[in-house]
Amino acid sequence: MLWLLFFLVTAIHAELCQPDAENAFKVRLSLRTALGDKAYAWDTNEEYLFKAMVAFSMRRVPNREATEISHVLLCNVTQRVSFWFVVTDPSRNHTLPAVEVQSAIRMNRNRINNAFFLNDQTLEFLRIPSTLAPPTDPSVPIWIIIFGVVFCIVIVATMLLILSGIRQRRRSASLEFLQISGTRESLTSLGASCLTSCLHGASTSNL
């Protein structure tokens, strides 16, 4: 009698969990890609943990607090690793709506990823969109960044003013030097002209 009941339950589960069945989801894991040489083997213990995480997620959905690990069914498990799963409602002998399962997974996606040391790219729920990672607080406060930018602008502006002043002073000094040189040349020319005139006058007087 017990064997008959066991085979009956197994047959019902096989009928509920099938690839592309209503309310079924496919999961694909890339353990080697995520963990490299530290990748662990996917076995019945990992399957149990996955069922537990899905049941945990479903229990946080209103009116689904009674979800148990046994309500989560896995099927078509491959070595690569991929499989399908459904969440059942034993009282009615059918699977829970895909919308409810999707909502539960999305709300707890980070918890599920962390349980397997994976992320949205290496633990893929193919019919459940990836969730956006929560915004992270910057390690440096915004006001320090703004202060640093303003301080740099002030420093650059001050340096430009100093360089402009130095350039202006050099230009003024060059103009003064040219004016003094011009004055000296004028005085020298005037003195030479006077001397020439005086010598010419003296020569005329002697004649």
Image: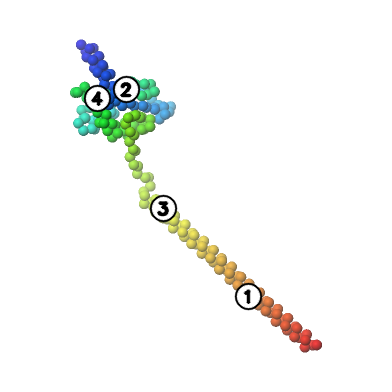
Q: Nearer the viewer, residue 16 or 173?
A: 16
- State the separation of the CA atoms marked 4 and 1: 107 Å
Please give the residue where the numbered disc 4 appears in the rendered image: 95
Say which element carries label 1. Answer: helix
- State the separation of the CA atoms marked 4 and 3: 58 Å
Please give the residue where the numbered disc 2 appears in the rendered image: 19
Give the x, y percent position of residue 65. 21, 30
Displayed quadrant of residue 179: bottom right
Q: Earlier in the sequence, mark 3 or mark 1?
A: 3
- State the separation of the CA atoms marked 2 and 3: 57 Å
- State the separation of the CA atoms marked 3 and 1: 53 Å
Please give the residue where the numbered disc 1 appears in the rendered image: 183
Q: Name the residue: 53% across, 65% down.
A: 168
- Going by the image, does 123 lie left or right of 183? left
Q: Earlier in the sequence, mark 2 or mark 4?
A: 2
Say which element carries label 3. Answer: helix
Q: Amino acid at mark 1?
A: Thr
Say which element carries label 2. Answer: loop
Tell me, for residue 148, which label it has, or none. 3
